[in-house]
Amino acid sequence: MIQNCPVVVLAAMALFSQIQASDGVWSEKRAREWYAEQPWYCGFNYVTSTAVNTTAMWQADTFDPKTVDRELGWAQDLGFNSARVFLQFLVWEQDPEGMKARMKEFLDIANRHGIRIMFILFDDCAFSGKQPFLGKQDEPVPGVHNSGWTPSPGAAIATDPAQFPRLERYVKDIVGAFGQDSRVVVWDLYNEPGNGTRNASLPLVEAAFRWAREARPRQPLTMGVWGGESPKLTKTMLALSDVIAFTSTATSPRRASASIY
């Protein structure tokens, strides 16, 4: 994926289906009815250009609504109507009410520009090689792709079941707060699960779906299949998703990467 750009211009298309019935998973009929009510989404991954990662984007001191307004205005002018937006567990844990207030402000801005949001709760991508941390973030390294990007919540927490009560509170609070909000179109619960952790992320993948369903959102739940996860993870993600999402990542430096959902 491409991140840390003012507006990442990505062609996005929807491909929704239901491949396997499971407790709580939407039926194929329900998924098709939901899809029939949706417009054609054209979207992009979004992180404010002033934020080196999700911590900087969502912390109170560096949350930047003026930049959000300007950049989503550019996106609107280009014809985009959706965006995929990463959250950060550590910021929520430090300041749950403040984080939700900033999310609401972000949604208010996006709505003014006709852009609906797919929020991402967890992320195993760790481009910087570091675990997430609060406070002032590292300065970006010029010319280095996502030099300051950190995961959410980080492998040490994501692969330790003893930490799951903390993560359960996070999922239920966020999904519970915005699960009836029409400005949120889909929940992408986990970006690239298994990236660096392989099957160690499987328990959190399964738990994230369970916790989110218990919050009873009106929106569908999904996790994007991205090709680097294990076959076991892939099968689980597809089986538990209400609608199918996938990420196409180009490997050539001459080609743009795209999230397709």
Image: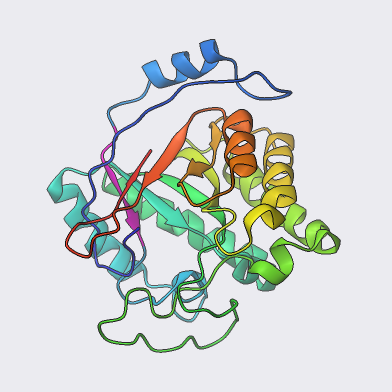
> From the viewer's perspective, is residue 32 above or below residue 192?
above
User: Residue at coordinates 68% horizontally, 32% vertically from top-left?
Assistant: 216
From the viewer's side, name the closer residue of 74 and 220. 220
Q: Is 185 or 257 nearer to us in this picture?
A: 257
Q: In which quarter of the image is residue 89?
A: bottom right
- Residue 52 appears in which quarter of the rendering? bottom left
The answer to if 238 sits in the magenta stretch is: no
Residue 163 location, quadrant: bottom right
Q: Residue at x 68, y 55 (%)?
A: 201
Q: Is the magenta stretch mostly helix, strand or loop?
A: strand
Q: Which of these two is toward me, 53 or 157?
A: 157
Residue 97, horizontal then vertical, whole percent: 64, 63
Instruction: Tell me what residue is drawn at x 45 percent, y 88 percent.
Output: 138
Q: Where is residue 143 in the image (x, y as percent from the top left)?
A: 25, 82
Q: Does the magenta stretch include residue 44?
A: yes
Check the image and tell me how it is coloured. rainbow
- Which residue sits furthest left? 77
Quadrant for the N terminus in the image: bottom left
Question: Which quadrant is the C terminus positioned in?
Answer: top left
Query: Is the residue 154 above or below the residue 22 in the image?
Result: below
Q: Residue furthest right?
A: 162
Q: What's the residue at 24%, 50% (across, down)?
A: 10
Percent across and percent down for residue 256 are: 22, 56
Give the vertical position of 71 relative to 180 (above or below): below
Residue range highlighted in magenta: 41-46
